[in-house]
């Protein structure tokens, strides 16, 4: 009598494991793109480790390193978006009505998570609130719209106890797309607000 082996083939086990893990991987990826809880926001906006401009302790004497300025300082040029590259950043899909700077009520829960984070683990953080739009409309109009929307978010945060001195409103209009403006999905991603940490603790 022949006994059949019903144990799964190793390759089938690998495929099954990958399929089971896929929802978790997608959830983690989505969290990384758009943090939605105070804990995720705090994680996304953790300070960049302090680095030095020249060499390492192994390549130079300690006395040479002590006077080196840190790479990041509180004097970040926020007028240039490229100057903010490499700093901790959290993108948020804050919902506005079409052609309006009025925050929709369905965005309040997410904004309240930012309030919690800024009152909790990010209580010393200074942030740029960077407004972005898609490319529908003129460049000057979109710059204006992105500024009004970023200002509305600052007003909301200040109204919920966050000090205005910790927030800097910047408008970048349509100049910094993260996706193609040729599709509705891409335009949705481009209509965003970014919170970028620029305080001197970095």
Image (cartoon, rainbow, N blue to C red):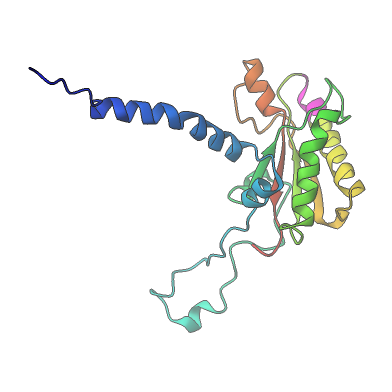
* Residue sitting farthest toward the bottom: 63
The picture places residue 145, in percent across and down from the top left corner, at: 83, 29
User: On the picture, is 59 further left or further right than 167?
Assistant: left
Our reading of the magenta stretch's main secondary structure is helix
Q: Nearer the viewer, residue 108 or 194?
A: 108
User: Residue at (84%, 22%) from the top-left corner?
Assistant: 97
User: On the picture, is 44 further left or further right than 63?
Assistant: right
User: Residue at (77%, 53%) from the top-left corner?
Assistant: 118
The question of residue 140 being in magenta is answered with: yes
Within the image, what quadrant is residue 122 found in? bottom right
The picture places residue 59, in percent across and down from the top left corner, at: 38, 74
* Range drawn in magenta: 137-142
Against 183, is 123 above or below? below
* Residue sitting farthest toward the right: 159
Against 169, is 2 above or below? above
* Residue sitting farthest toward the left: 1
* Residue sitting farthest toward the front: 1
User: Residue at (41%, 26%) from the top-left corner?
Assistant: 19
User: On the picture, is 177 further left or further right than 141?
Assistant: left
Q: Quadrant of the C terminus?
A: bottom right
Q: Nearer the viewer, residue 86 or 79?
A: 86
Q: Nearer the viewer, residue 58 or 124?
A: 124
Against 63, is 186 above or below? above
Q: Quadrant of the N terminus?
A: top left
Against 112, is 59 above or below? below
- The number of numbered badges drawn on the structure is 0
The question of residue 45 being in magenta is answered with: no
The picture places residue 76, in percent across and down from the top left corner, at: 70, 56
The picture places residue 92, in percent across and down from the top left corner, at: 70, 36
User: Residue at (69%, 48%) from the top-left corner?
Assistant: 196
């Amino acid at each position: 009598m022949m006994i059949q082996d019903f144990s799964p083939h190793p390759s089938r086990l690998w495929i099954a494991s990958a399929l089971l893990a896929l929802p978790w991987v997608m959830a983690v990826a989505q969290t990384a793109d758009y943090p939605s809880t105070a804990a995720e926001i705090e994680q996304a906006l953790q300070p960049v480790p302090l680095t030095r401009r020249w060499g390492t302790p192994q390549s130079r004497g300690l006395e040479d390193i002590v006077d080196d300025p840190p790479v990041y300082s509180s004097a970040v040029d926020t007028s240039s978006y490229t100057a903010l590259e490499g700093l901790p950043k959290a993108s948020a899909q804050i919902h506005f009505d079409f052609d309006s700077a009025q925050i929709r009520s369905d965005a309040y829960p997410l904004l309240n998570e930012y309030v919690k984070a800024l009152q909790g683990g990010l209580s010393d953080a200074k942030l740029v609130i960077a407004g972005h739009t898609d490319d529908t409309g003129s460049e000057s109009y979109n710059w204006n719209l992105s500024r009004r929307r970023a200002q509305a978010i600052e007003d909301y945060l200040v109204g919920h106890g966050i000090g205005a001195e910790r927030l800097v409103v910047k408008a970048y209009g349509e100049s910094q797309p993260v996706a193609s403006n040729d599709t509705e999905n891409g335009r949705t991603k481009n209509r965003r607000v970014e919170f970028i940490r620029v305080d001197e603790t970095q």
